[in-house]
Image (cartoon, coloured by chain):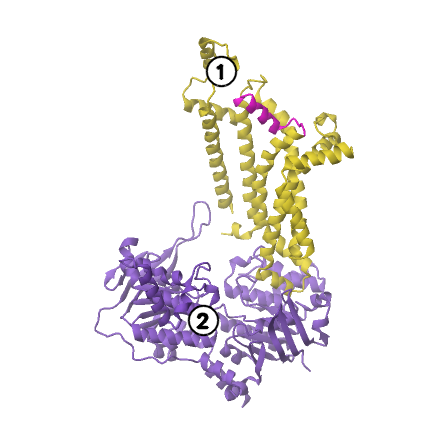
Chain colours: A purple, B yellow
């Protein structure tokens, strides 16, 4: 018998239909993967089960958990279920914990509430649970506050809260999306162990087909609030009977067609980084003493040819973004020099840097946060033009913006729109248009596709490849996602604790990693092919 | 943590010194010679010159500032021209009225505002929210002296529950004294409470949209418990900031309210001293008010650290 049974669930918010006739079930000890792109209704399905929907939402259909009719249950009944029989883990570990309460209080709170245990007993159970999720007492006493923990550690605390009372069902909504691949693998392992330990049912929600395939027994594919296909994971993904399943699978493994890399070997290097180090002052321990300096980037040297596409990969906090900021002359190295087009850019003043700035641009991760919502596209895309020697006239400016928009696949009419009128993928096209409008020689892209859905991500990767070919722009991709590195770069640099520990041709490094850091990244990276093959093998 | 507190303390002291320089300088450049004022229109130039010497008005500016500031530190504020008593005695007597008044008003506005803010935020967009925020809007808009007159009319003239004005002195007993401070305190507190309730509401609404509220709800805590245990403390930072700023407005408000209720407080003292050009008194009381505002804001800074563990990060 199923633990959770969702039958013909429909949901509307105001007049907007969110879910239409969703069917889904989870058995005890089973992992059900719920996959879909953003806006497909995955999270709303989860919140319906928890009955934590927004006020305006109206649900119809049947949701049965352990014999209880969820949609008809009273709020008191739901409070008794939440946190006791149903636990939930959320996407964003950085904000999921109350900043003014200790982790001990936050884990013990649910235990005390549901079991009426004394404070001491509840804290003891909280302690055991934190040990269980890999936060041992010696390093993580109950008195720690969330801001003293990293993202991965916080997600462990959230899991400890959700699993403290051994729930029958755990709902995990994108539990690893905000984490780097190595942490992701650790968290997924932890969830797998918890499922095996107490025959807990797991509803795993993700946009990442590879993660879901690795984890789940069965899979449900959601699109625009409707179930496209559902069934056994291995069979569903190996047969790919439904066109949308095929489309998703293809998109998540997409490799853009690329012409031979440009970069004439003989020409002068575009970018040379020589022995660059960046120290940050340690934090103040007392009025007169500081902790020793933190070395974010440690003696890094690299060189890029014109038109070359290079990936800088590493776990979060390894120093890759600091290095990128120094290359963009947004931060100064503590020592070492950076040369761009043969000219030293370290230690130059802002006016002296202007010519260099023309030739280097940046694309950021978050297509939502990188635009002023109150300005029109024309102004936003034209922003970098102030570095030009001669200020363009208004007509020239419109001409240049129109041209840049055309190159990224947007229309001239989009010039007079505001950012909110575009989808996430279109916005990332806008940030690329903004980056290429000055005809730069180098574009630094910081996780440019990790916030995007797989199909859109495939399109954006294609766009990067096309612009590389057409305009000969060199790319420095900063990413922890090896599929991106594999899809679009010629060379890869693996960074670990501030140093570059391995470098070489992308395919060679990713297929035969030598350093520990690179091996760990490759082993942890979810891979759809590998996951399907393993599933098939397990089932014989 | 210690570093944070010391830094705040240093900033507060620097502000106090700067404020004393400004107060001293402003009264220095104001037209009017205190000696001439004291001696009247018919005094001869010699007499004035003699008094100026006696009062130390002929000494160099910097020396006079140091003398004045040193006096403030040792609570020697000088003598009032009009009352011919030491300013400190005047201030002490008046503070016995104004300080309780301001504290009662502050407590009252907090006690009213926070529950109203909680109520409104938890019923966002519903009738209860609309009504209480409408009332708050009215409270912000109505001037407190008019409101004070209405209070006098209803509670003193019509219901005859409390005196309409005046202060019997603490020697008349605690209850009669408190009774005469009640209406002025309400008149002072309500406009402040209205502002504070709005701030509490919007701070809470912002916090209620945070992810950790959802985490707390997913633990099975009822909405009300989440509101009290998780939302309120996180919403306290903006509320405390406004509370600190309001203290300054409360002090300014006493000048009007004490005149309406005929209370012998600091506000009335300042008002009278200004009309009588008793600059020593004005200087001293203004400095005292400045010091009080700075002290309260220092207290607010310290309470941030108590509320938010991120400010007292461990070593």
| Image location (x, y in percent) of residue A326 | 34, 60
- Give residue B35's mark: 1
| Image location (x, y in percent) of residue A336 | 29, 59
Mark 1: few/some/many CA within 10 Å (<14, 14-19, 20+): many
Give the farthest residue toward the bottom: A540
Taking B37 as reference, is A62 left or right?
A: right
| Quadrant housing residue A325 | bottom left
Mark 2: few/some/many CA within 10 Å (<14, 14-19, 20+): some
| Quadrant housing residue A134 | bottom right
| Image location (x, y in percent) of residue B128 | 69, 54
- How many discs mark residues in the rendered view? 2
Q: Secondary structure at mark 1?
A: helix
- Give residue A425's mark: 2
Q: Chain of mark 2?
A: A
* Residue B315 among those drawn in magenta: no
The segment highlighted magenta reads B261-279
Have a look at marks 2 and 1 and say if they share a chain. no
**Does residue A119 appear in this view?**
no
Asked if residue B128 is positioned above or below residue A309 in the image, the reply reads: above
Taking A305 as reference, is B18 left or right?
A: right
In which quadrant of the rendered image does the C terminus of chain A lie?
A: bottom right
Asked if residue A62 is positioned above or below residue B304 in the image, the reply reads: below
Taking A52 as reference, is B280 left or right?
A: left
Seen from the viewer's position, the closer of residues A34 and A222 is A222
Residue at position x 65%, y 76% in the image: A9
Seen from the viewer's position, the closer of residues A379 and B208 is A379
Seen from the viewer's position, the closer of residues A404 and B287 is A404
| Image location (x, y in percent) of residue B205 | 60, 56
Q: Secondary structure at mark 2?
A: helix
């Amino acid at each position: 018998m199923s633990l959770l049974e969702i039958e013909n669930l429909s949901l509307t918010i105001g007049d907007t239909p969110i879910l239409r006739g969703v069917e889904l079930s989870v058995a005890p000890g089973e992992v059900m993967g719920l996959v879909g792109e953003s806006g497909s209704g995955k999270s709303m399905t989860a919140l319906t089960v928890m009955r934590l929907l927004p006020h305006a939402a109206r649900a119809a259909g049947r949701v049965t958990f352990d014999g209880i009719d969820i949609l008809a249950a009273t709020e008191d009944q739901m409070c008794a279920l939440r946190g006791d029989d149903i636990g939930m883990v959320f996407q964003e570990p950085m904000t999921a914990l109350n900043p003014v309460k200790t982790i001990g209080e936050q884990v013990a709170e649910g235990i005390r509430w549901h079991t009426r245990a004394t404070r001491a007993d509840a804290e003891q159970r909280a302690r055991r649970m934190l040990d269980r999720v890999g936060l041992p007492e010696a390093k993580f006493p109950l008195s720690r506050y969330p801001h003293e923990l990293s993202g991965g550690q916080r997600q462990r605390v959230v899991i400890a809260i959700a699993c403290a009372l051994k729930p029958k069902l755990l709902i995990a909504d994108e539990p690893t999306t905000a984490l780097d691949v190595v942490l992701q693998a650790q968290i997924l392992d932890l969830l797998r162990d918890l499922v095996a330990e107490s025959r807990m049912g797991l509803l795993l929600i993700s946009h990442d087909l590879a993660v879901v395939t690795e984890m789940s027994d069965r899979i449900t594919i959601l699109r625009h609030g409707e179930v496209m296909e559902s069934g056994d994971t291995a069979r569903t993904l190996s047969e790919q009977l439904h066109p949308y399943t095929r489309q998703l699978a293809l998109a998540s493994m997409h490799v853009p067609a690329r012409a031979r890399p440009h970069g004439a070997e003989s020409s002068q290097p575009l970018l040379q980084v020589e022995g660059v180090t960046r120290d940050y002052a340690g934090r103040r321990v007392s009025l007169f003493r500081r902790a020793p300096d933190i070395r974010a980037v440690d003696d890094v040297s690299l060189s890029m040819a014109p038109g070359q596409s290079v990936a800088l990969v590493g776990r979060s906090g390894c120093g890759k973004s600091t290095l990128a900021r120094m290359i963009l002359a947004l931060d100064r190295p503590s020592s070492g020099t950076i040369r761009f087009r043969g000219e030293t850019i370290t230690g130059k003043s802002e006016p002296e840097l202007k010519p260099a700035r023309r030739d280097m641009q940046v694309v950021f991760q978050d297509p939502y946060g990188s635009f002023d919502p109150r300005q029109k596209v024309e102004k936003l895309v034209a922003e970098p033009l102030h570095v030009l020697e001669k200020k363009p006239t208004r007509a020239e400016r419109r001409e240049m913006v129109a041209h840049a928009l055309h190159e990224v696949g947007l229309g001239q009419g989009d010039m007079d729109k505001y950012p909110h009128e575009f989808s996430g993928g279109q916005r990332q096209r806008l940030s690329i248009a903004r980056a290429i409008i000055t005809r730069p020689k180098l574009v630094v892209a910081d996780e440019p596709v990790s916030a995007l859905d797989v199909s859109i991500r495939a399109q954006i990767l294609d766009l990067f490849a096309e612009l590389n070919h057409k305009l000969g722009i060199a790319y420095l991709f900063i990413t922890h996602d090896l599929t991106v590195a594999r899809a679009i770069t010629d060379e890869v640099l693996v960074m670990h604790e501030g140093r570059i520990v391995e470098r070489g041709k992308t395919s060679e490094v990713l297929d035969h990693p030598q350093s520990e850091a690179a091996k760990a990244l490759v082993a942890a990276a979810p891979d759809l092919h590998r996951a399907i093959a393993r599933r098939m093998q397990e089932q014989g | 943590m210690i570093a944070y507190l010391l830094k705040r303390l240093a900033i507060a002291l620097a502000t106090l010194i700067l404020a004393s320089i400004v107060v001293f300088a402003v009264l220095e450049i104001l037209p009017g010679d205190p000696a001439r004022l004291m001696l009247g229109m018919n005094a001869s130039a010699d007499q004035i010159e003699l008094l100026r010497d006696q009062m130390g008005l002929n000494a160099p500016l910097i020396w006079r500032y140091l003398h004045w500031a040193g006096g403030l530190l040792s609570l020697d504020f000088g003598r009032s021209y009009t009352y011919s008593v030491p300013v400190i005695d005047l201030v002490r007597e008046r503070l016995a009225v104004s300080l309780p008044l301001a504290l009662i008003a502050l407590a009252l506005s907090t006690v009213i505002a926070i529950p109203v803010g909680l109520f409104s935020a938890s019923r966002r967009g519903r009738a209860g929210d609309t009504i209480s925020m409408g009332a708050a809007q009215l409270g912000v808009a109505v001037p407190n002296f008019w409101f004070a007159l209405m209070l006098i009319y209803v509670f003193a003239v019509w219901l005859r529950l409390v005196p309409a004005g005046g202060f019997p002195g603490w020697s008349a007993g605690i209850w009669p004294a408190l009774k005469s401070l009640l209406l002025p305190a309400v008149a002072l507190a309500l406009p402040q409470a209205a502002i504070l309730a709005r701030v509490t509401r919007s701070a809470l609404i912002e916090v209620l949209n945070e992810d950790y509220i959802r985490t707390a709800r997913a633990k099975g805590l009822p909405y009300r418990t989440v509101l009290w245990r998780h939302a309120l403390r996180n919403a306290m930072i903006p509320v405390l900031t406004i509370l600190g700023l309001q203290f300054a407005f409360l002090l300014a408000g006493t000048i009007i309210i004490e005149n309406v209720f005929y209370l012998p407080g600091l506000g009335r003292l300042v008002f009278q001293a200004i009309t009588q050009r008793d600059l020593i008194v004005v200087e001293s009381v203004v400095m005292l008010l400045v010091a009080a505002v700075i002290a309260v804001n220092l207290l607010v800074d310290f309470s941030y650290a108590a509320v938010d563990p991120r400010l007292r990060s461990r070593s």
